[in-house]
Amino acid sequence: MPDDSRPLYQRIADDLRASILAGELEPGAKLPSENTLKARYGTTRTTAAKGIALLKSEGLVVSSQGKAATVRPRPNVQMLTTGANFRRRLASGVSNFNAEASAHGLKPEQRILNVATAPSPPEVAGRLGVPDGTPVIVRQRLFLVNGEPTQLVDGYYPVDLFRGTPVEGPKRIRGGVSALIEDPSGPIRGRIMRFVEDLEIRMPLPTEADVLTIPRGVPLARVLRTAHVEGGRVVEVLDSRIPCDRHTFRYVIDAS
């Protein structure tokens, strides 16, 4: 294309990106070597390497010293948000994240990183309806799919409701905290009536990028989710940070 005004490294990146997105280069496939690209485009290895580096910055390609660049595997979980879906998952005794990942043939895992009582951050306190700094129980978890980190989730819980419950402990809760909240013989015995989710898209903080292995240039979705029971009380606030290259979100709104 003699009239193509794009820099040559950009053309290389664009062509490879098109092959990746079209599925011609599948996850795990090796990219053409720098020498191959040099010959194909009549350029230098430096220019070819610059094109590959651009794809690395977009999170499409991974490479390490002495190894060929490969298409980055990206296990993708679709998180479906509907009331019926929530009820179905709750009845199964399997948490929503685990159920959604398994439904896509993926292997989910949840790791509890820390459980502690700590002052509530202002945005959490506002949702819980308590003064800033009010002690809350915080459960910090890392979600993985096929061994790859996919979510950092901090759960915040009112101490007066959850003191002495499994929420204070370091073990996973069968069916998740929602099942504990609705357990008719449990400590809360409430019925969750509404979820409210606030979605923010931003670049990850360095610590988030490190824990979630987010490549340069890939944004992060932050979802603050509040769970309301009868009477309107908020019993849970979830602060989820999710790499945007590993999830799709679907919200089904029944307007009938």
Image (tube, rainbow, N blue to C red):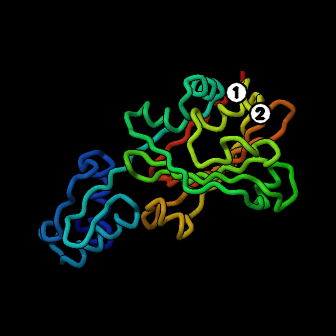
Residue at (67% x, 33% y) in the render: 180
Q: Which mark is residue 183?
A: 1
Q: Nearer the viewer, residue 37 or 112?
A: 112
Label 2 element class: loop
**Looking at the picture, how far across and down is residue 130, in whole percent?**
86, 53
- Badge 2 vs badge 1, beta-carbon distance below 8 Å: yes
Image quadrant in which the C terminus is located = top right
| C-alpha separation, residue under disc 2 versus residue under disc 1 | 7 Å
Residue at (55% x, 24% y) in the render: 92
**Looking at the picture, how far across and down is residue 187, in whole percent?**
76, 33
Q: Nearer the viewer, residue 167 or 194?
A: 167
Image vertical order of residue 156 relative to residue 227, above or below: below
Label 1 element class: loop
Furthest residue in direction top, as rendered = 256
Q: At label 1, which amino acid type do we have? A: Asp
Residue at (45% x, 53% y) in the render: 149
| Label whose residue precedes the other's in the sequence (2 or 1) | 1
Q: Which mark is residue 188?
A: 2
**Looking at the picture, how far across and down is residue 127, in whole percent?**
80, 49
The 10 Å Cα crowd at callout 2, few under 14, some 14 to 19, many 20 or more, is some
Q: Quadrant of residue 190?
A: top right
**Looking at the picture, how far across and down is residue 168, in whole percent?**
68, 48
Q: At label 2, which amino acid type do we have? A: Ile
- In the rendered structure, the answer to whether residue 91 lies left or right of residue 54 reads right
Residue at (21% x, 59% y) in the render: 31
Image vertical order of residue 19 relative to residue 104, above or below: below
